[in-house]
Amino acid sequence: MKLLATLLALPAFALAQGSLAPADVPTPTMKSLQEIWDRIGTVETQNQTLQSLVANQQQQLAALQVQNTILLETTGVVWTWQLSTIDSTGDVGPYASLAFSPAGLPSIAYYDATNANLKLARFDGTAWQLSTIDSGGNVGAYASLAFSPSGQPAIAYHDGAHGDLKFFRSGDRFAQISVVDSVGTVGQYASLKFGPDGQPAIAYYDSTNGDLKFATLGPSGWQVSVVDSTGDVGQYASLAFSPAGQPAIAYYDNTNSGLKYAERNG
């Protein structure tokens, strides 16, 4: 009875039930698709900004290197060459072709005249690693080395035993060797480059017909065309791609003892 009397004596607000509604609206934990898309756009913008900063820093570094070179030359500093022997097993080294990997390490494709093989030397940062790429007959003359966009070495070279132009490309799991052109005696003075589309292209000499030829790798295989057939032309070919992405070739005109230049239009 005393307890009941005490409860009845309490103010009404002391016995009232509080509000069941939360004081604040709960914050959602899941992002909407629009919020996610906006965030991706922000990250892409930040990435582009970082890439631009890196490119500017690389340009500044190149400029500083040029200035440093000029400064050293004007102060009378004498540059020295560091010489090293890469391979001395037999008669090796003709038709050497040097290229740097995306990591900045040198590699050299060359002809092993003693064994008539194509060889490749790659510097791993500590030592030179030597390997025989092709030993099927007399192969490896007129070697031309280039690195693919994925960073793998590729070599165009002449197969003297069959008179063919051959192409080697290293892969992540296996290497591939293919015959590019086997019509007549072809493949001397090969010059290999990778185009803007990431595919290899080769300029070379057709000694059977005295022509300058050009080969590109497409979805259906190698596509071969004659660039110049006026007289005896195509020796000492040098291939490059223009800023517009078109192939261009400098070469020797043996008939007229002159230097010629060819650039593809369109």
Image (cartoon, rainbow, N blue to C red):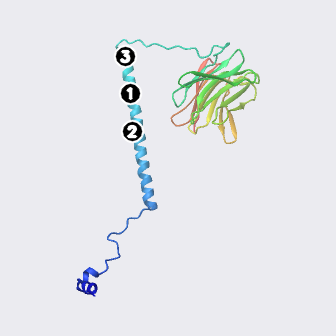
Instruction: Look at label 3 and name its amino acid.
Output: Leu
Disc 3/disc 1 C-alpha distance (Å) = 14 Å
Report x, y in % for residue 109. Answer: 62, 23
Asked if residue 232 can be seen in this view, the reply is no
Sequence-wise, which precedes: disc 2 or disc 3?
A: 2
Sequence-wise, which precedes: disc 3 or disc 1?
A: 1
Q: Using the image, determine if residue 108 lies above or below residue 150.
A: above
Asked if residue 127 can be seen in this view, the reply is yes
Q: Secondary structure at mark 1?
A: helix
Q: Which mark is residue 63?
A: 1
Report x, y in % for residue 194. Answer: 59, 33
- Would you call the spot at circle 1 few (<14 residues within 10 Å), some (14-19), or many (20 or more)? few
The answer to whether marks 3 and 1 mark residues whose Cβ atoms lie closer than 8 Å is: no
Frontmost residue, 162 versus 104: 104
- Residue drawn at the location 23% of the way across and 85% of the way down: 9
- Residue drawn at the location 36% of the way across and 23% of the way down: 67
Which of the 4 image quarters holds residue 6?
Answer: bottom left
Q: Which mark is residue 53?
A: 2
Instruction: Look at label 2 and name its amino acid.
Output: Leu
Frontmost residue, 227 versus 236: 236
